[in-house]
């Protein structure tokens, strides 16, 4: 039994939760003796992380990335396939899932890459993988990518989309025509790259758009049947952070002008999903111009603080970080505190506002673009009813989880 102030059906209620076999059996009367300090929210889902591993262990591993997720109140991550080697075939997909089964601290699932070279075999690959694992999406489909292997053109995507309705396609929407190759992206990448790609893609079909960063493309998607996610860095940082971040600034899509940032912030209630695009690179790699920000551990804590200060509502936050991701990607049993669902909770003490410090975080990359920002980290995290994080510290005997739903 876990009891206290619970976020239930859009509001805080005083109640007790009975758990059986990792799932919520009953939500009922408050039992004072079992009361936890702080408020109990559904643990978050981060549908966009790059956990590296394989040949890029120095940046991050599934183990360190999911440990970072756990400390950020996230119970399920969706890993992206632009690994080295990429997850564009059955063998690599199975290899990675098996690795996750052994080393992930939170539930783990994996998108399958769609590339110019594997699209003809996509049906067969999906069929084989689906016998064992639930594939949340085919993505992150790169309309533009530095590596030719991962890039895909509109024509191919249109062809493939036509054959696979019902499959969630996640798209990194940046039109190559607007991206200057080999140049620092924050100077030369124009916002038109995203706007144009989104305009073309909504004509092709319904997609889930990764990391939307401009108000024009957001509005375009809102008026379509597609869905989209926004990252904390595109809502909280802007080109004005160049001075502070220096060499750390590179990220795709790039940080935007204040007008876009403020629009996304003001329209938080209209976005579908808040996702981190956790893309860890070491400081050395950043010096060399690598693009990407870490963020899986700081996302929920930053936004809990914003909700507490009244900038956004808790209802909206829980929707974007838990219930919508579960619904859009089809994760049954996740996203809401409801009878029958997994008992996955994050407990936050609203009095415990801290400043984010890279040295306190658990990603291997060793830095954060949110250094010094106010945040509220979870005191406790429960996964399938087990307390796996206690007083902000990993509990001794953490269960290794992995998603294996069919
Ligand atoms: O900045 C980025 N980093 N954008 C991407 O789309 C990929 C990511 C990465 O994997 O480093
Ligand atoms: Zn991307
Ligand atoms: Zn990404």
Image (cartoon, helix red, strand yellow):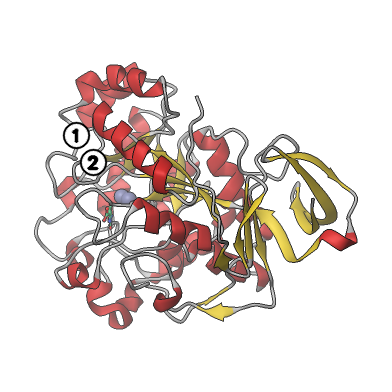
Q: Which mark is residue 390?
A: none
| Residue 93 placement (x, y as % from top left) | 30, 33
The residue depicted at 25 percent of the width and 45 percent of the height is 82
Which residue is farthest front? 397
Closer to the chain start, of discs 1 and 2, is 2
Expressed as whole percent of the image width and height from the top left, the position of residue 368 reads 37, 72
Is the residue under label 2 in contact with that under label 1 (CB below 8 Å)?
A: yes
Position of residue 217 relative to residue 88, above or below, is: below
Q: State whether residue 197 is above or below residue 112.
A: below
Residue 265 or residue 58, whichever sits in front: 58
Residue 395, image x, y percentages: 57, 61
Q: SS for tag 1? A: loop
78 sits left or right of 287 in the view: right
- How far apart are labels 1 and 2 at the CA level? 6 Å
Q: Which residue is at 19% across, 40% downward?
A: 150
Asked if 107 appears above or below 368 in the picture, the reply is above
Q: Which residue is mark 2?
A: 143
Tell me what residue is drawn at x 48 percent, y 77 percent: 356
Q: Which mark is residue 153?
A: 1
Image vertical order of residue 330 relative to residue 322, above or below? above
């Amino acid at each position: 039994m876990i009891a206290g102030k619970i976020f239930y059906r859009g509001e805080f209620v005083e109640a007790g939760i009975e758990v059986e076999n990792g799932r919520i059996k009953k939500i009922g009367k408050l039992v004072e003796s079992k009361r936890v300090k702080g408020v109990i929210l559904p643990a978050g889902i981060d549908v966009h992380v790059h956990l590296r591993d394989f040949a890029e262990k120095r940046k991050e591993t599934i183990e360190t990335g999911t440990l970072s997720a756990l400390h950020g109140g996230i119970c399920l991550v969706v890993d992206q396939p632009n690994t080295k080697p990429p997850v564009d075939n059955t063998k690599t997909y199975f290899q990675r899932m098996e690795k996750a089964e052994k080393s992930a601290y939170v539930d783990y699932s994996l998108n399958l890459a769609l590339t110019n070279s594997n699209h003809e075999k996509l049906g067969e690959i999906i069929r084989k993988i689906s016998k064992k694992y639930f594939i949340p999406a085919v993505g992150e489909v790169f309309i533009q990518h530095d590596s030719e292997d991962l890039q895909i053109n509109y024509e191919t995507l249109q062809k493939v989309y036509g054959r696979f309705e019902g499959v969630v396609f996640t798209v990194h929407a940046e039109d190559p025509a607007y991206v200057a190759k080999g140049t620092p992206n924050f100077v030369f990448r124009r916002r038109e790259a995203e706007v144009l790609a989104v305009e073309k893609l909504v004509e092709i079909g319904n997609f889930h758009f990764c990391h939307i960063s401009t108000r024009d493309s957001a509005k375009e998607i809102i008026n379509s049947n597609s869905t989209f996610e926004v990252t904390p860095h595109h809502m909280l940082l802007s080109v004005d952070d160049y001075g502070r971040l220096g060499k750390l600034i590179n990220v795709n899509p790039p940080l935007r002008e204040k007008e876009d940032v403020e629009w996304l912030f003001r329209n938080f209630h209209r976005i579908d999903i808040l996702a981190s695009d956790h893309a860890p690179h070491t400081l050395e790699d950043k010096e060399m111009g690598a693009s990407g920000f870490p963020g899986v551990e700081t996302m929920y804590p930053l936004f809990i603080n914003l909700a507490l200060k009244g900038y956004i509502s808790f209802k909206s936050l829980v929707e974007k970080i838990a219930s919508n991701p579960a619904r859009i990607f089809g994760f049954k049993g996740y996203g809401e505190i409801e009878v029958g669902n997994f008992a996955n909770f994050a407990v936050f003490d609203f009095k415990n506002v801290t400043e984010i410090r890279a040295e306190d975080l658990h990603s291997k990359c060793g830095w954060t673009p949110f250094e010094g920002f106010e945040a509220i980290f979870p005191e406790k995290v429960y996964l399938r009813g087990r307390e796996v994080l206690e007083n902000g510290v990993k509990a001794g005997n953490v269960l290794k989880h992995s998603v294996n739903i069919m």
